[in-house]
Amino acid sequence: MADKEDQKDQFFYPRARYYGDFKPENLAFNANLQEFAQRVAYICGLETGGKLAPEEAYEEIRRLWKQLKRSKSELLDTPKPPPPELPNGEDLPPGG
């Protein structure tokens, strides 16, 4: 049963492989970007099919865009703290 659920999730929520600069924050933003694109595609389909009013579609996409901008700001625009200073080898006990 879980296999069918996995297949269904892959069908409805496809994810492309990430080939960019591998950093955790880049990977997280890429996942958010793909989710944004997928949701916008669904909203467009609903609006095109007459199931969602144009104004509602616009507002929903605008809300999703604000979430994506916040994600970018938090993940990519925030300066990273400097790495901690490690003691030099002279201060370490023998074998450490």
Image (cartoon, helix red, strand yellow):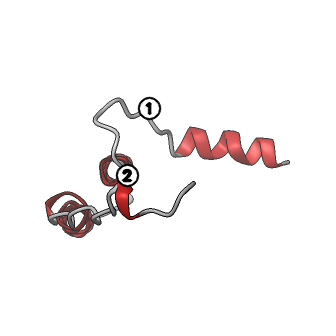
Q: Is residue 46 visible?
A: no
Query: Amino acid type of disc 2?
Result: Pro
Q: Position of residue 80 (x, y in %)?
A: 20, 63
Query: Amino acid type of disc 1?
Result: Arg
Left/right of residue 15 with respect to residue 32 in the rendered view: right
Q: Is residue 9 visible?
A: yes
> Quarter of the image holding residue 4?
top right
Task: Indicate the secondary structure of the residue bearing disc 2.
Answer: helix
* Residue drawn where x is 33% and y is 46% of the image: 23
State which mark lies toward you, 2 or 1: 2
Q: Position of residue 33 (x, y in %)?
A: 30, 50
* Residue drawn where x is 79% and y is 42% of the image: 3
Left/right of residue 13 with respect to residue 90 in the rendered view: right
Name the residue tied to disc 2: 24
Name the residue tied to disc 1: 17
Closer-to-camera residue (13/30): 30
| Other residues around mark 2 within 10 Å, as few (<14) / some (14–19) / many (≥20) | few
Closer-to-camera residue (54/67): 67
Left/right of residue 73 with respect to residue 85 in the rendered view: left
User: Earlier along the polypeptide chain: callout 2 or callout 1?
Assistant: 1
Q: Is residue 66 above or below residue 26?
A: below
Q: Which mark is residue 4?
A: none
